[in-house]
Image (cartoon, rainbow, N blue to C red):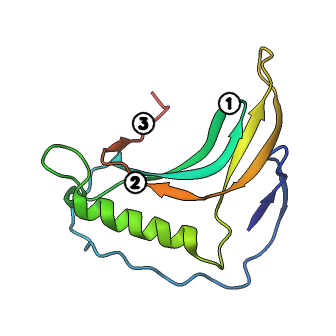
Amino acid sequence: MQQNDIGTGLLTSERAMTTTPAVVNGTANATTTYEGGSGYVINWITNSVHNGRKIRGRTFIVPATGQSFSADGTISPATQTSAQTAAAALMNDTATELSVWSRFWDTAKPPNQTGGSLTPVTGVLVPDRAAQLRTRRS
């Protein structure tokens, strides 16, 4: 488990996990087709604002199986409901401190990081649209 300085984001230490997490088996079998770089996103909402902007986070669930999408290319209602329910359960889990870490920057060129904030998640939204992860490699 890594620990980072909240103000800078720099790694400060690393500890061994004392309890191995339980295996979670998915419902898709090995021959199920998936959509490569396509999937959906979970938006983590907070009640905090910095420099006039709401602090929020995102988790990309990629790749997603073909059954995750509707015929019009949006997320299927079943996938959206399932993801929203699971994300809300994580947010409401009293043993978990789900937070979004946000970097703060100055306006100089080039910009310099001036600090950061760890903000508790207060809401979750799974929008009905596909998300793409693009490679930076050419």
Q: CA distance from mark 1 to mark 2?
A: 24 Å
Q: Residue visible at 31% across and 44% down?
A: 129
Could you say which is closer to the camera, residue 38 or residue 121? 121
Could you say which is closer to the camera, residue 82 or residue 133? 82
Q: SS class of the residue under badge 1?
A: loop
Q: For the residues carrying marks 3 and 1, which lies nearer the camera in this image? A: 1
Q: Residue visible at 40% across and 63% down?
A: 84
Q: Amino acid at mark 2?
A: Val
Could you say which is closer to the camera, residue 77 or residue 59? 77
Please name the residue that numbered disc 1 is placed on.
52
Q: Position of residue 30 (x, y in %)?
A: 26, 71
Give the mark nearest the N terminus, 3 or 1. Answer: 1
Q: Which quadrant of the rendered structure holds the N terminus?
A: bottom right
Q: Position of residue 31 (x, y in %)?
A: 21, 68
Q: Amino acid at mark 1?
A: Gly
Q: Which quadrant of the rendered structure holds the C terminus?
A: top left
Number of numbered tags placed on the structure image: 3
Q: CA distance from mark 3 to mark 2?
A: 20 Å
Residue furthest to the top in view is 109
Please name the residue that numbered disc 2 is placed on.
126
110 with respect to 100 (left or right): right
Q: Residue visible at 81% across and 26% down?
A: 112
Q: Residues within 10 Å of mark 1 (few under 14, many from 20)?
A: few
Give the mark nearest the N terminus, 1 or 2. Answer: 1
Q: Amino acid at mark 3?
A: Arg
Is there a contact, CB below 8 Å, between mark 3 and mark 1? Answer: no
Please name the residue that numbered disc 3 is placed on.
134
Q: Position of residue 33 (x, y in %)?
A: 21, 59
